[in-house]
Image (cartoon, rainbow, N blue to C red):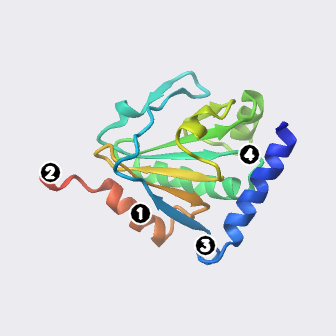
Amino acid sequence: MNCRRLRVALCLACAALAASPGVQAQGYEVVPWSAHKPVPSLQATDLNGQVWRLKDLRGKAVLINFWASWCEPCRAEMPSLQALAQSLGPEKLRVLAVNFKESEGTVRRYAQRNELRLPILPDPAGLLARQWGVRLFPSTVLISADGRVRGVLRGELDWSGAEAASLLASLLAPPPGQR
């Protein structure tokens, strides 16, 4: 499938997600991560040359946001994700923004234009998205501070709202033995 057809298909998938009953009122859905489903490793280099490994982030909640600059819901969601990361700080929460199949130049220009300060991890071949089972954009993998994947949020969420606060509370809470 050529790049243009893929983009059209992905945009249609985003539109279908937003228009589907039950999701339309919220704009997103959370799909639980099965306890029997293996957790892919994540190792990627951001636009500044820093290597990020999921295993190194244990003890912090992690959001792995899969996005693209051509995806309108992704663009709408990004400012609230960035504000969330800044307000909680890197000791509590890490937000990793994985860009789907765009050139590094395109991603850099978008990040500069929008003053993004999140770690942006290019995924030019879509390998990370494939490993995590991401097919709709935006999608955000929710990982608790104890390193467990809790689910995947598919669709756009205002990360400054009450729904996000509820999701984050369970990710940020210390494990039962450490309370």
In the picture, measured across the screen, residue 129 lies left or right of residue 179, that is right
Image quarter of the N terminus: top right
Is the Cβ of the residue at disc 3 closer than 8 Å to that at disc 1? no
Residue under the point 71% across and 35% down: 101
Q: Position of residue 72 (x, y in %)?
A: 74, 56
Q: Please name the residue that numbered disc 2 is placed on.
A: 178
Pointer 1 residue: 167
Coordinates of residue 146 in the picture (x, y in percent): 28, 45
* Tag 4 near tag 3, CB within 8 Å: no
- Neighbor class of circle 1 (other Cα within 10 Å; few <14, some 14-19, many 20+) is some
Residue at image position (59%, 47%) is: 134
Separation of marks 4 and 3 at Cα, in angstroms: 23 Å
Rendered residue at 80%/44% (across/down): 6
Q: Nearer the viewer, mark 2 or mark 3?
A: 3
Secondary structure of the residue carrying tag 3 is loop
Q: Which residue is mark 4?
A: 69
Q: Give the secondary structure at mark 1.
A: helix
- Circle nearer the N terminus (2, 1): 1
Check disc 2 and give the amino acid type.
Gln
C-alpha distance separating marks 1 and 4:
25 Å
Q: Between marks 4 and 2, how big is the CA–CA gap?
A: 40 Å
Q: Are marks 2 and 1 in contact (CB under 8 Å)?
A: no
The quarter of the picture where residue 11 lies is bottom right
Closer to the camera in the image, 176 or 93: 176
Q: CA gap, disc 2 to disc 3?
A: 35 Å
**Mark linked to residue 23:** 3
Type of the residue with mark 3: Val
**Closer to us: mark 3 or mark 1?**
3
Q: Mark 4 or 2 closer to N-term?
A: 4
Task: Say which label, 4 or 3, has the lower sequence index.
Answer: 3
Please rate how many residues cluster around mark 3, counting C-alpha atoms within 10 Å: few if below 14, some from 14 to 19, many from 20.
some
